[in-house]
Image (cartoon, rainbow, N blue to C red):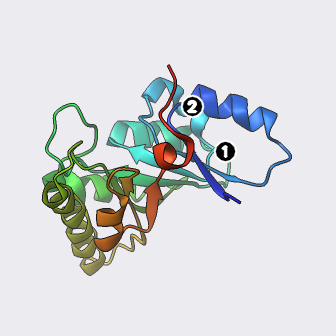
Amino acid sequence: GLTAVGENRVQEALAKQEQLTDVAVEWHLIGTLQRNKAKHAVGRFALIHSVDSVGLAEDLDRRAAGGSRQPILVQVNCSDESQKGGVLPTELPVVLDQIRPFPRLEVRGLMTMAAFTENADQQRDAFRQLRQLRDAEVRRGIPLPELSMGMSSDYLVAVEEGATIVRLGTLLFGERGT
């Protein structure tokens, strides 16, 4: 019954896509995308959630075929954790202004991950910040309908704060094997 499937790793997703050609699902890349993997990702995913730099966006734009457009989300580091990817909240307007003109990319929204904590207030702060950043961009005339935030451990708080996409791997499939 799932209509959208998210994958963390490009190579694993491509292998599954080849095996599941007869299954009608929308593939999302939700994990970190390294620039050297951009050529394998563009055109293979309905939505790439983790565009975390102008350089990566340039690579995706350059590799998109002809008149096609690759839908993306810009990842924002709202948890202020150095180990997490994403543009800094203060840099978001400039990054969006640089990415939006790329002719083969379609910026559909923003993505963030809260700190890995059970503290719902801390989770809420990150999700609320992303929503407020999106709202500020909408006031600037930039439509960003999607907010990808919340995973199995914090999706309820994310939904309360306006998430339009949640990532529920562990909740649906259990812990990831090694």
Residue density around tag 1, few if under 14, some if 14–19, many if 20 or more, within 10 Å: few
- Of callouts 2 and 1, the N-terminal one: 2
Quadrant of res 82: top left
Q: In this rendering, is residue 4 above or below 18?
A: below
x and y percentages locating residue 162 in the rendered image: 33, 72
Q: Which mark is residue 65?
A: 1
Answer whether residue 170 is visible to the viewer in this image. Answer: yes
* Placement of 164 over or under 47, stated as above or below: below
Q: Is residue 129 left or right of residue 154?
A: left
Q: Secondary structure at mark 2?
A: helix
Q: Residue 59's x, y, as percent?
A: 47, 36
Q: Which image quadrant: the N terminus?
A: bottom right
Above or below 100: residue 20: above
Asked if marks 2 and 1 touch (Cβ < 8 Å), the reply is no
Which residue is painted at 61% across and 46% down in the image?
45
> Residue 100's x, y, as percent?
40, 59
Residue 163's mark?
Answer: none
Q: Which residue is mark 2?
A: 10
Does 62 appear above or below 113? Answer: above
Circle nearer the viewer, 2 or 1:
2
Q: Which of 66/35 is in front?
A: 35
Q: Quadrant of residue 58?
A: top left
* Secondary structure found at label 1: loop
Q: Marks 2 and 1, Cα distance to the nearest angstrom?
A: 18 Å
Task: Report crowding for label 2: few under 14, some 14 to 19, many 20 or more residues within 10 A (C-alpha).
Answer: many
Residue at image location 20% in from the left, 56% down from the top = 123
